[in-house]
Amino acid sequence: MAYQALYRKYRPQTFSDVVGQEHITETLKNELAEGKTVHAYLFTGTRGTGKTSCAKILAKAVNCLNPKNGDPCLECESCRAIFEGENTDIVEIDAASNNSVDSIRELRDLISFAPSSSKYRVYIIDEVHMLTLSAFNALLKTLEEPPSHVIFILATTEVHKLPATILSRCQRFDFRRIDNAKICERIQYIAEKEGLTVTADAATLIAAAADGGMRDALSILDLCASSSKNIDEATVESVCAMAGNDYLLELADCIKAHSSEECLLLIDRLHNSSVDMLRLLSELTSHYRDLMIVKTVKSKAKPVVCSASRLKALELQAESYDIKDIMYCISTLQAASAAMQTGNRRCEMEMAVLRMCDPVLSADLSALERRIENLEKNGVKIAESSFKNTVSAKPAAIIEDDDDEIPPPTDEYESPAPIESGLQPEKAETASKAKTENEAKAENSVSEVQNWDEILRILKTDCPLIAGVLLDSKAYIKGAYLLIDAPNSQFRSMINNSNASYKDSIRKAAQKVLGVTYKLGPYTRQNTMENTSDPLAELANKLKNYEIN
């Protein structure tokens, strides 16, 4: 005898066998027990939730010679004929391949004939949403007032595609996704019948992968059984090409640490292990969804399907994440999922992970919001500096560094940064006259840093936030100072902030490349009277220097 797939072998034969749809099966049993059957039913819900099974059970029940509380007896001549597929009064139609108006007209002509051996002629139309508009119109009148010996059962996964005129003529039943606990229970029952050993964690993983569909769960179990009679988590992960919990936790940790290199190397290892990138993206999305739930739901009963050890690992990782970062990651992954349908899957996965590591690389609004939030979280005010506060504090041409590095200007000290107008402070001029001509030349000479791009690459890894602010910037060396010309107005605010981490990051990156630890200052272009003849333009340049927006 040919092997029969588990989902076919264990297909429910009575309403009592149907798992997870009690709200539907109890209603149908009561209607049948009281003889209140209607002429048209509509079963809708996601795949694998029992729509077709319930349709076949209903077809048997209305024709059963000895029904038991609404369930078919499975022993009478009618039940056996339907089970063996010999009853010609039960007609199954696949609307995906018979969706034309001619097919419906042919059906309409046949329903006038009385059933040959049963009480009712039952038409089960699967995937009914695939019918054309003309076919729906041809079905309308028949569906509303069929002969008394005809019952229609329509099944669909996309009820929103059905015309309202069809919906109003049917008694509708909505099939829910089956609870994961019930799927696990059913898996263990079937495994015992088949001589298989399935661990609790493996059953949970199968239920999670099935996404509420019993047929998908049994198909996965069937696949695992072909690999091993003793099924554990590793078996399910291998058979389904899943990334596995450890990989997901590790990948999320690397994203949190902004470690782009580690993320790409990990994805490379997974790709070489034949892990499907679309499946990995789906699992990573589910992982961040679990983090979102764990982060938000404080009660013990969390809507997360996983083992106790997995839940503990999720709770630990969720502590290090901000809820907005989690939601940004989910949005990025969902956008990548759409792009994967037409683009290179591996490349799309890698780009999505890079965007999550560094929001600077993303051009969407949510990424910009995350960058602004990170700035504000570190004490940086965005576009809020007033002219009054700026002038009363310090000239904007001088960035305050650590107190032990930049003393206040005195008669013997020259300010490291030129004023925008091109004139040096009087005290700086007095100090310059006291120096020898050679020393003054050496100290006043400004040279551009040729390998500034290399310093920015280091900053991109060590401090992505400041690297983003320094996009399109240049740097110059003047004496003991590294003067930075950054077009982004946020640069001055970040450096002037009491948080010294930004300044330290720049100094360390520069030291790695230049071999010298410099003090920091801004670079402001000097404007002579020759190129600043317009007084309004000169005033505008000065206001820019004071960050007036």
Image (cartoon, helix red, strand yellow):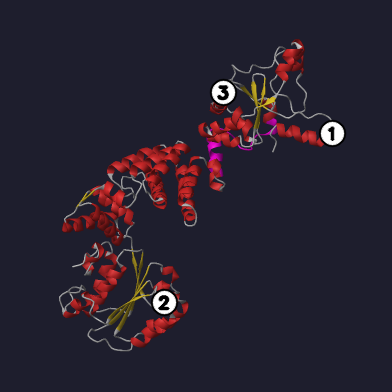
Callout 1 amino acid: Ser
Callout 3 amino acid: Gln
Secondary element at image label 1: loop
The one of 300 and 65 positioned closer to us in this rendering: 65
433 left or right of 105 in image:
right
Mark with earlier residue (1, 2): 2
Secondary element at image label 3: helix
Q: Name the outermost residue toward the left.
A: 75
Magenta segment, which residues? 368-388
Q: Quadrant of the C terminus?
A: top right
Q: Is residue 412 magenta?
A: no
Residue 99: image tag: 2
**Foreground label between 3 and 1:** 3
The one of 308 and 240 positioned closer to us in this rendering: 240
Residue 98 in the image, given as x and y percentages of width and height: 39, 77
Q: CA distance from mark 3 to mark 1?
A: 40 Å
Residue 117: image tag: none
Residue bearing the label numbered 3: 511
Residue 328 in view, yes or no: no
Examine the rendered structure and indicate whether residue 48 appears above or below residue 349.
Answer: below
Residue 222 in the image, given as x and y percentages of width and height: 25, 58
Residue 35 in the image, given as x and y percentages of width and height: 24, 79
Secondary element at image label 2: loop
Residue bearing the label numbered 1: 533
Q: Name the outermost residue toward the bottom.
A: 113
Q: CA distance from mark 2 to mark 3?
A: 72 Å
Q: Are marks 2 and 3 in contact (CB under 8 Å)?
A: no
Badge 3 density bin: few <14, some 14–19, many ≥20, Cα 10 Å: some
Q: CA distance from mark 1 to mark 2?
A: 79 Å
Callout 2 amino acid: Asn
Mark with earlier residue (3, 1): 3
